[in-house]
């Protein structure tokens, strides 16, 4: 892993992963929404040791901006070996599940736009027959809960997309990594009541970075205990699951 | 994020906050401050102040921890500019491989740059370098009446002086530019010297201060007749042969306490035992040794959350400055010994006479003594009040960063010029500490 493209580079978790990459003197290409913030981040990562940092401002939830992102990446980092898709949004659930427009927006942001981008980038990886495509989904995508099933549906859809992409790219040696973090203490979750279950972004980022450096796993739960919790949740019959109180 | 349990390092007092807001980017500061009600908000970093100067009971906190980007650095001239939430640990990780060090570091590297300025912290080299504020070239301050001020000794000089040691009450510190100090390498040449009385300490300390940049002493305050302790002194040093030069962070073991320990385990007996064990360990150390910088400067960081060792009730730290007269020290120690409420790790350091630009800066020429007391309710508070009386009889003062209980009078006697500070307060900011010591 030497040349990395990060989509959604300004997210709290992505920033921490980028720091680890910078400390390992890697080359980064960052895509995020605000050029001003990207410039601050670029300087920071260079001072922390990154070999090179390119930045490009785009709103990835807008499909019409995708061609310019692809063109920029292909020009500035044609030999990228790792793609990390880290952007996401969590709309206010109360509103999101009662308004059609918000349901569409949530699923569009977190699933459709991501699937579209990955489809285009997959071509590049398939042609080079190596590298790793990683995307951050969520434990919320494993089962639908009353409190966040719209977000969960979007992330779950993306996870299934990744699973299929993995099978498709496996024969040509391209790895696809699905990252499923539990709740993290970031601006995205700042409006939620916090509990001890909220992990710090540094910890999640360390796990992601480690998983990127290795060849395994295909699906990463982070922090680690979510793998066990979700194993239980996944096998629970729906007739029980629907009765589970919100914790 | 709703308030919840947001404690200071001493885990006392336990207060509730209405909201804890976070800043992720500098441009979010001005709107947040504009939206705040009068005296409702307190900017904070890592909550490493011991008492309530980083708490705002019933009101709001604004965590600046995620403002932690390095903005610029010059490793030729030796300066660094970064956002205020950057920790000293992160700064050192970046600068030490280039052979630059922070001009002043406290006993932990897990504090933010903004906190270092707001408390005008001091370190083991106070006799050479003065306090942290002396090395701050400029900083950006977001005030409710002026969202983007740059303060330096030349520009907005009054606000510069008020903000250094200003407890975060003059505005939100967004970024700061500090001087760095050249070092020959990532290590320290350390001398460890036992002493058996305070007289001996003063003598040793005077001798070590002459040819060492850093000095600090630990002693056992349960044995006042013969204050047995150890004096550490050190100088920066290149890595000895066999160690690579760039090795800034050798793998260090870090420990974590899983939960607040029960209160019964810390009592006069166990503290005596711990102190003896510590002394034994230090005495078995070679008199002269090479150490990486972290264990020399930040020995307590090896237990990430050592504050949980004091249990659910938490603890109080008492740090005072007193004239360099042994009878004051003896009187304080006798009072503590009589109470039978010993302190684990009493720390003693002689301040130098380099003045700080800060209006409310704590260090002044003389001795400073720092003691930890497990919180045991009224009895502990009474003991500290008794210590106050001794400190003020000799014209001493108390350190706000460590305090959770000093009465208004004690603050005002510690900082006789405190009224000069009032015009620079930001009307939207306040803290539990500030309301207590100004009677607001």
Image (cartoon, coloured by chain):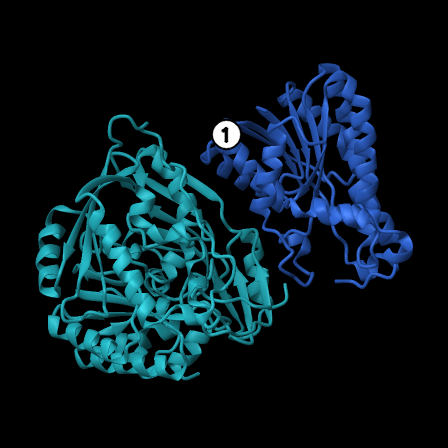
B35 and B298: which one is in front? B298
- The residue depicted at 68 percent of the width and 32 percent of the height is A217
B223 and B10: which one is in front? B223
Secondary structure of the residue carrying tag 1 is loop
Residue B35, image x, y percentages: 60, 67
Left or right: residue B209 versus residue B219 is left
Chain letter corresponding to the colour cyan = B
Quarter of the figure that contains the C terminus of chain B: bottom left
Residue B34, image x, y percentages: 57, 66
Left or right: residue B108 versus residue B289 is right
Residue A70, image x, y percentages: 72, 26
Question: What is the total number of numbered labels drawn onto the structure image?
Answer: 1
Residue A110, image x, y percentages: 78, 43
Quadrant in the picture for residue B163:
bottom left
Mark 1 chain: A
Residue A106 visible:
no
Left or right: residue A74 versus residue B159 is right
Q: Is residue B167 above or below residue B140?
A: below
Task: Using a 10 Å C-alpha cutoff, classify the residue at mark 1 as few (fewer than 14 neighbours), some (14 to 19) or many (20 or more).
Answer: some
The residue that disc 1 covers is: A24
- The residue depicted at 57 percent of the width and 40 percent of the height is A206
Quadrant in the picture for residue A130:
top right
Residue A107 visible:
yes
Quarter of the figure that contains the N terminus of chain B: bottom right
**Chain A colour?**
blue
């Amino acid at each position: 892993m030497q040349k990395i493209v990060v989509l959604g580079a300004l997210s709290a978790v992505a920033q921490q992963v980028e720091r680890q990459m910078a400390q390992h003197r890697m080359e980064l290409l960052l895509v995020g929404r605000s050029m001003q913030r990207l410039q601050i981040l670029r300087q920071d990562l260079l001072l922390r040791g990154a070999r090179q940092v390119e930045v490009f401002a785009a709103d990835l939830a807008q499909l019409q901006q995708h061609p310019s992102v692809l063109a920029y990446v292909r020009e500035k980092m044609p030999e990228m070996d790792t793609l990390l898709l880290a952007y996401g949004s969590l709309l206010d659930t109360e509103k999101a599940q009662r308004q059609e427009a918000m349901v569409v927006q949530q699923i569009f942001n977190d699933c459709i736009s991501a699937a579209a981008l990955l489809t285009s980038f997959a071509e590049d990886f398939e042609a080079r027959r190596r590298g790793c495509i990683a995307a951050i989904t969520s434990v919320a995508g494993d089962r639908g809960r009353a409190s966040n099933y719209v977000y969960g549906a979007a992330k779950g859809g993306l996870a299934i997309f990744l699973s299929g992409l993995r099978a498709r790219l496996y024969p040509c040696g391209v790895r696809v990594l699905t990252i499923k973090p539990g709740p993290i203490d970031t601006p995205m979750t700042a409006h939620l009541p916090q509990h001890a279950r909220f992990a710090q972004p540094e910890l999640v980022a360390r796990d992601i970075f480690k998983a990127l450096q290795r060849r395994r796993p295909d699906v990463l739960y982070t922090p680690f205990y979510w793998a066990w919790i979700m194993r239980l949740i996944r096998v629970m019959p729906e007739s029980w699951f629907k009765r589970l109180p919100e914790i | 994020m709703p308030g919840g349990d947001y404690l200071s390092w001493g885990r006392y007092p336990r207060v509730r906050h209405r909201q804890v807001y976070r800043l992720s980017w500098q441009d979010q500061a001005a709107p947040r401050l504009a939206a705040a009600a009068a005296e409702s908000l307190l900017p904070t970093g890592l909550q490493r102040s011991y008492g309530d100067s980083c708490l705002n009971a019933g009101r709001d906190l604004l965590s600046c921890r995620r403002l932690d980007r390095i903005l610029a650095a010059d490793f030729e001239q030796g300066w660094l500019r970064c956002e205020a939430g950057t920790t000293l640990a992160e700064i050192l990780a970046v600068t030490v491989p280039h052979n630059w060090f922070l001009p002043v570091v406290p006993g932990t590297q897990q504090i933010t740059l903004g906190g270092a300025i707001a408390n005008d912290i001091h370190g083991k080299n106070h006799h050479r370098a003065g306090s942290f504020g002396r090395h701050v070239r400029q900083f950006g301050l977001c005030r409710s009446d002026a969202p983007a001020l740059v303060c330096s000794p030349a520009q907005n000089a009054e606000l510069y002086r008020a903000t250094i040691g200003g407890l975060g009450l003059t505005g939100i510190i967004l970024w700061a530019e500090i001087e760095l100090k050249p070092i020959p390498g990532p290590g320290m040449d350390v001398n460890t010297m036992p002493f058996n009385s305070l007289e001996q300490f003063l003598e040793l300390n005077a001798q070590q201060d002459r040819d060492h940049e850093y000095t600090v002493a630990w002693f056992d305050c349960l044995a006042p007749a013969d204050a047995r302790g150890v004096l550490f002194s050190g100088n920066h040093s290149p890595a000895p042969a066999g160690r690579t030069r760039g090795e800034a962070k050798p793998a260090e073991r870090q420990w974590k306490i899983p939960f607040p320990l029960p209160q019964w385990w810390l009592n006069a007996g166990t503290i005596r035992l711990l102190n003896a064990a510590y002394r034994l360990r230090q005495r078995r150390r070679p008199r002269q040794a090479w150490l990486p910088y972290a264990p020399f400067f930040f020995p307590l960081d090896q237990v990430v959350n050592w504050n949980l060792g004091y249990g659910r009730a938490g603890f109080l730290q008492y740090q005072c400055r007193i004239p360099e007269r042994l009878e004051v020290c003896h009187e304080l120690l006798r009072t503590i010994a009589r109470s039978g409420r010993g302190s684990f790790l009493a720390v003693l350091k002689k301040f130098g006479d380099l003045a700080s630009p800060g209006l409310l800066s704590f260090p002044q020429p003389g001795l400073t003594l720092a003691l930890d007391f497990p919180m045991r309710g009224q009895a502990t508070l009474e003991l500290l009040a008794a210590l106050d009386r001794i400190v003020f009889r000799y014209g001493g003062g108390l350190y706000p960063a460590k305090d959770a209980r000093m009465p208004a009078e004690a603050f005002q006697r510690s900082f006789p010029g405190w009224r000069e500070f009032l015009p620079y307060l930001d009307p939207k900011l306040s803290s539990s500490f500030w309301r207590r010591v100004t009677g607001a």
